[in-house]
Image (cartoon, coloured by chain):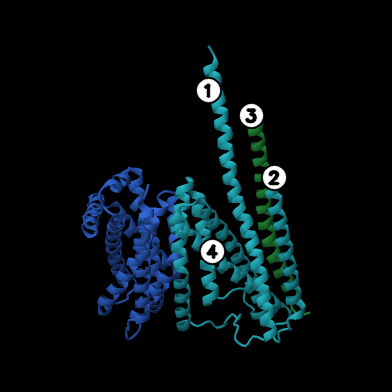
Amino acid sequence: MPAEHSNSMAGRMAATLFIAALVMCAGYAALFIAPEEATMGLIQRIFYFHVAAWSSMFIAFYIAVFANIAYLITRRAKFDWLGLASVEVGVMCCTIGLVTGPIWAHPVWGVWWTWDARLATTFILWLLYISYLLLRGLVDEPQRRAMLSAVFGIFAFLDVPLVYVSNRLWRTTHPQPVILGGDKSGLDPTMGKVLGFCIFAILGVMILVLLDRYRVEKLRHDFDELRFEVESRAADAQSNLAKAKP
Amino acid sequence: MKNFNSLFAAWTAVWAIFFLYEVSVARRVSRLREEIERLKQQLREGS
Amino acid sequence: MTTARAAAIILGKELRLEFRTRELLTATVVFALTVLVLFNFAFDPTAADARRIGPGLLWIAFLFSGSLMLNPSFARERSNDTLDALRMAPVSAFAILLGKMLANFIFMALAEVILVLVFSVLYNVPLAGVAGRLVLVLVLGTAGLVITGTVFSAISAHARMRELLLPLLLLPILAPLLIAAVEATASLLTDPPALDRTWVTFLAGFDIVFLTASWLLCDFLVEE
């Protein structure tokens, strides 16, 4: 293997180990250091990772819209790769949030789901960005795909605050019988510190996965270029052979 | 331990989703790397 | 040629094209009427029910039939290669988009007027007293639908499965518009009717945000 490759490998190994250690500490903190919540008991501890997943999701989608805008301005393929990677990772984080939410809600509140503003917005977000991925799957030409998904990505991002505001306004006139918690008002300071640590750890995980996903796109690009070169060399060799014949 | 099952289920869900995704990405990375090496080899032999 | 003039010409073309056959308009109206009728079978609403769920029913019908109707906007251009001709003409990308948006608006508006009247009759909901304010809500809501729908029609025209893709892209984006339009319409059916200013402002805001975004990004939508 060439030298630069193994150096970056070492770097990646180190980063992965560091993040893995962070996550284990975060898990320990969430399970043992954080004080037990008065009413909900043990299940409340999932809150740390539930909120951390959603924070990472938002950051991933911010990265995505940045990549979308950058692609439209510069037309450089790497921003398209970044856009795709960050949306996929964001959808994964969103899925984690949407799955852990009901698992937490059911034993505590007796319902699997409530249509409060935050949950409804997250569900719509999930649908919006899945649509982004579906759009990409249905456009075959790479440059057009990059451009169309960048435009859609920007529209989707613009919609997010509108979705949240409309849901909030709506909920003031159609209040929920059960308000899903997660309010940080009156959060015990130790809980707050554990939460911050978990958010940081999960963010690290998200960034690592994002970089890996980005790498897939970059490698795919390198592969296509190499294959093109191999094929054109073969074609050249063929035509030279044909010319050489008397 | 109140609600331990749910905590366990949630924990499993988090890491299952994450691992499934990460493994699929990592596999794609190594497969692409192999293919690229193979093509590079072909180019070296051809020239 | 100014953008306004170019848009007007394109609007004229779209209208002429459609009124030659009127197939799109007819299909849209019939589809929305079908939704109205099916709702009756699904819910069997009393007059009081109809007031309560009527706004939701109407706007769902508009959104669904709109997302079917907006497809041909750009898809038609693509299959006949007329988009290339439009691109080469000395008109700005925004003029093309605007012309189509206005045309789609007119088509949707026509369908909606018919539907609202039919709804009023079928479900015994008198609308005479609030007609003017209702028109305002319809205009603002339809504008949002048509602005985003035309843009996404341009996007999905280049994709496979575009008939399915357009609703898939459009409906999640329109969730806030749906909430706002339904609430604003519902506020007109209360006793006494009182147009909810908050929601009307929200609708206007939605329209402005997406019209501006369309204007900023129009070149990317119409290019080669």
Which residue does the numbered mark 2 point to in the structure image?
Answer: A2
Which residue does the numbered mark 3 point to in the structure image?
Answer: B46
Colour given to chain C in the rendered image? blue
Work out how far the residue at label 4 is from the one at label 1, CA to CA, in angstroms.
47 Å
Instruction: Measuring from the top left, give residue A132's x and y in whole percent.
Output: 50, 58
Instruction: Measuring from the top left, give residue C54's x and y in whole percent.
Output: 38, 73
Q: Is residue B2 above or below residue C59?
A: below
- Disc 4 or 2, which lies upstream in sequence? 2
Q: Callout 2: few (<14), some (14-19), or many (20+) C-alpha neighbours within 10 Å?
A: few
Tell me the amino acid under the disc marked 4. Ile
Tell me the amino acid under the disc marked 1. Ser
Residue at position x 33%, y 55% in the image: C27
Residue A239's label in the rendered image is 1
Closer to the camera, A143 or A48?
Answer: A143
Quick check: marks 3 and 1 in contact, CB under 8 Å?
no
Colour given to chain A in the rendered image? cyan
At mark 3, the secondary structure is helix
Closer to the camera, A60 or C181?
Answer: A60
Q: Chain of mark 2?
A: A
Tell me the amino acid under the disc marked 3. Gly
Work out how far the residue at label 3 is from the one at label 1, CA to CA, in angstroms.
15 Å
Q: Chain of mark 4?
A: A
Q: Quadrant of residue A94?
A: bottom right
- Disc 2 or 1, which lies upstream in sequence? 2
Q: Are marks 4 and 1 on the same chain?
A: yes
